[in-house]
Amino acid sequence: MTISQPRPADPIQAASRHDWTLDEILALLELPLVDLLWQAQAVHRTANPGYRVQLASLLSVKTGGCEEDCAYCPQSMHHSSDVSGRPELAVEPVLERARAAKAAGAHRFCMGWAWREIRDGAPFEAMLAMVQGVRELGLEACVTAGMLTDSQAQRLAEAGLTSYNHNLDTSPEHYDRIISTRTYQERLETLQRVRQAGISMCCGGIIGMGESLQDRASLLQVLAGLNPHPESVPINALVAVEGTPLEAQEPVDPLELVRMVATARILMPTSRVRLSAGREQLSREAQILCLLAGADSIFYGDTLLTTGNPAAEADRELLAAAGVTPWQG
């Protein structure tokens, strides 16, 4: 059913919905901001009593030289911004960073490889050892490394991997303007392999890449149509990096990011909505609005793969100012 002014969301009903129409989602995105925030609050306070926020740390294990041509990414070998040249990290230095992240208060440790797909052999064995080591520290472990096979997904599950990140980035309609080296369908198939292996799914997108409001609604429709919903939904704002095709894009209005967070929360009540890339460009007030809108995770530490991120001490002060509690699990 198409509606122009959505009714206040029923958290229990919304939790079971995977049939949101494009018009319904557009109507949410276009609501007066105070009304949208009120609806998101109604859902979020039920799904997340106590307003707890998970702190996640992200480390680039293999940086740059990626075969993909994602227009936003400074790690693509197709762009002059390619940041290759850094050696791939070995197991023990990664676990040292994981220990430091835990000591600083992180609950999840995410590791990234700039690959088109996971490579068998020594690199994959090292990845499995990192996952096992991170889990032994008592942290959640997340990996992002491109496409993977059924057997690789199964081995990652056996190693204890908590979550696999594989973003859709944008809508199916806008996708070809951003990436040509991998299809949207291939991304969906990767997610299906992750799900079949029993690994939780981390999947979101990026705004500010020249997409329309309808594209944003379409991305959210795909995410909310997954059954079950992704356990983790990162909402990113483009960080325009010199040397990438999107280097001239204007920064996203912070309130547009707030709207995406709030709408994602309404559509996927029990998913963890992660405030991700682009947070360094937000004021403290804009970040608190995102927390108010339903973000219940932030990436915590100095860097996000290759872009800046607010420092840990500033994050602790932010959460204290907002009156929210770090999630311990």
Image: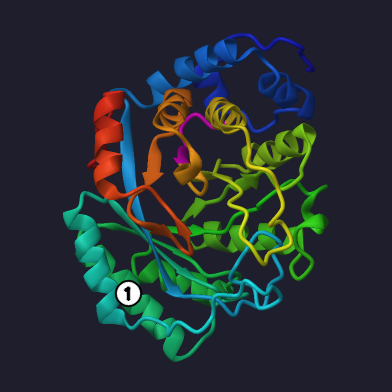
Q: Residue at x 54, y 26 (%)?
A: 262
151 lies left or right of 161: right
Residue tagged 1: 130
Report the magenta residues as a range: 268-274
Around disc 1, counting alpha carbons within 10 Å, would you say few (fewer than 14), some (14 to 19), or many (20 or more)?
many
Q: Secondary structure at mark 1?
A: helix
78 lies left or right of 98: right
225 lies left or right of 107: right
Q: Is 144 above or below relative to 287? A: below
Q: Nearer the viewer, residue 66 or 145?
A: 66
Does residue 272 belong to the magenta stretch? yes
Which quadrant of the figure has residue 287?
Answer: top left
Which quadrant of the figure has residue 289?
Answer: top left
Q: Residue at x 37, y 77 (%)?
A: 128
Residue 40 drawn at (x, y percent): 51, 20
Q: Residue at x 44, y 55 (%)?
A: 308
Q: Is 245 above or below relative to 258? A: below
Residue 228 drawn at (x, y percent): 55, 42
Which quadrant of the figure has residue 102?
Answer: bottom left
Q: Is 22 above or below relative to 1? A: below
The amino acid type found where label 1 is placed reads Met
Q: Locate the N terminus and report the quarter of the image it occupies.
A: top right
265 lies left or right of 314: right
Q: Locate the C terminus and report the quarter of the image it occupies.
A: top left
Q: Residue at x 39, y 40 (%)?
A: 297
Q: Nearer the viewer, residue 310 or 119?
A: 310
Residue 172 drawn at (x, y percent): 78, 49
Residue 189 drawn at (x, y percent): 67, 62
